Amino acid sequence: MSMTEMWTQLGSAIAGLMFVWAMYERYFPYQLQEYVERYCQKLVALVSPYFQIVFDEYTGEDLKRSEVYAAIQSYLSANSSMRAKRLKADVVKDSHSVLLTMDDHEEITDNFNGIKVWWTSIKNKPNKQSFSFYPELDERRYFKLAVHRRYREIIVKSYIDHVIKEGKAVAVKNRQRKLYTNNPSDNWYGWKATKWSHVVFEHPASFDTLAMATKEKEEIMKDLVKFSKGKSYYAKIGKAWKRGYLLYGPPGTGKSTMIAAMANFLNYDVYDLELTTVKDNSELRKLLIDTTSKSIIVIEDIDCSLDLTGQRKPKKEKEEDKDGEGKDPISKKKKEEEAENKKISKVTLSGLLNFIDGIWSACGGEKIIVFTTNYVEKLDPALIRRGRMDKHIEMSYCCFEAFKVLAQNYLDVESHELFAKIRNLLEETKMTPADVAENLMPKSEDEDEESCLKKLIAALEEAKEEEARKKSEEEAKLKAEQEKEREKEKATEEEEKEKGNGKLKENGF
Ligand SMILES: Nc1ncnc2c1ncn2[C@@H]1O[C@H](COP(=O)(O)OP(=O)(O)OP(=O)(O)O)[C@@H](O)[C@H]1O
Ligand SMILES: [Mg+2]
């Protein structure tokens, strides 16, 4: 038989098989198809010398994405790129590199201490005959591991652990960090509904560009390193592997920037928790359980998000109060609606404390919780006691060391003759790093470093004068109040004296 004839016959055989398969799928009753396939599989398993394990993508009653499946996927993607014939490409890590994973129905082999194993990635099509609210759910994906029966024990005991461990390490290396925000609980249900939405975390802040006193900065970095390497230490002392930071200070002193720098330094994800959209303590707990390890959970402006009596107040409303806005009918209506919503929002202080250090916080491990506030004195001591908020960091007005970092960031200047003057002015007046940075930033191409520094000096001098003016105004106000008080006292004294004289006269003295 010639080669061409052989290929033709092979082609017709395949076409014939495909036809039979298509007829089987089309005309054979669906329920019977299931039976046939199930019994065929059983028969094969009975006679086959191979043993199989299946790892589903979604597990549990709530159909969460399986961590084991994800770890296996990472492990296989690292090992399959050289071996598998068909790969799927995905862009990862700051959109710069491509991650290759096994395509559906692709098989690769792996070798573990001389034992050969087969991995297949399988996707089962949804059942076309039956109706489903969530068709994606019917599309089952899983990995199938096959190995000779005689190696069953070693594979179950050691190989799977090895794959998961390696897979997790690969995932950490390749992962694109995420910034999560919590969804309102109305969106928590349905297929693929999640409690957290995410975007790629690409904040450029780092400890190098963070303006603050060097000693404090180094201390924080050391603390973070100690925490991230402290798995066995935390296990030894019997504490959940987590650490709480409280960042406090006036607006524009770098609290949010510090959180981004921490996340970049440790390579952690960030969960930005908006408390005002959480209805109650149990929702808060569910959100916490749904966070992953190696993450920073952030609650910004804690004093605005939670009234410590248990009545919470949305941030926006608080700002409106401050500005004296919200008096027009539209914002009044909005306020009323918010007040209505608030009635059903019941996250309490104790709920929050449980969130931080209750038994639930132990799940997942390796988590940092950060609170920020502009008014540390307003916070309940129970909330910020050591153990809950282990480290309190004051982000304060710009000092000379912080200014030097900003000058380096914005102007590429390490030293300048104007620095001495700036140093004196920074000691005499208060300016936030955000304001210093704004003054240092060149506004046009012809603005050189000297004119930027001069601009900062002018702003500092203006701030100093403003402070002096405010101070003298306050002193004058205080003096006037004291004077008023004294006059009031004098008037009551005289009144009492006159009353006394009147009584004496009445009594005939
Ligand atoms: N310490 C700092 N180092 C570097 N840049 C800073 C620092 N503080 C402020 N900035 C700059 O000012 C901007 C505002 O800072 P940031 O948002 O971190 O302040 P914040 O303390 O979180 O303020 P708020 O209390 O209003 O949330 C940042 O984008 C950053 O560019
Ligand atoms: Mg902030």
Image (tube, rainbow, N blue to C red):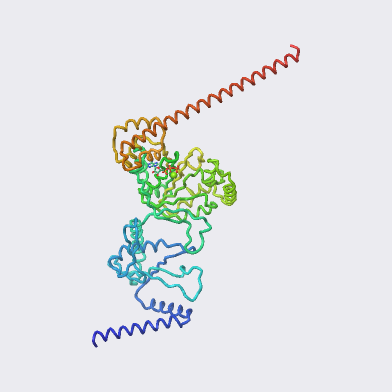
Q: Residue farthest to the bottom?
A: 1
Horizontal side of 187 relative to 436 (left or right) equals right
Residue farthest toward the left in the current orientation of the protein: 2
Q: Nearer the viewer, residue 448 or 215?
A: 448
Query: Where is residue 14 drawn, in percent x and y?
Result: 34, 82
Where is residue 321, by image quadrant?
top right
Q: Is residue 68 above or below residue 105?
A: above
Could you tell me how many numbered marks the image carries?
0
Decide: is 253 above or below 159: above
Foreground residue among 385 and 302:
302
Q: Residue 163's spot in the image, x, y percent?
A: 34, 62
Quadrant of the image containing the N terminus: bottom left
Q: Which residue sits furthest top?
A: 509
Relative to 60, is 218 on the left or the right?
Answer: left
Picture coordinates of residue 354 (x, y %)? 50, 49
Q: Nearer the viewer, residue 208 or 356?
A: 208
31 and 329: which is toward the camera:
329
In the image, ligand 1 is in what quadrant?
top left
Above or below for 367 versus 171 = above
Quarter that holds the C terminus: top right
- Asked if 93 appears above or below 507 in the picture, the reply is below
On the image, the x and y values in percent for residue 109 come to 30, 69
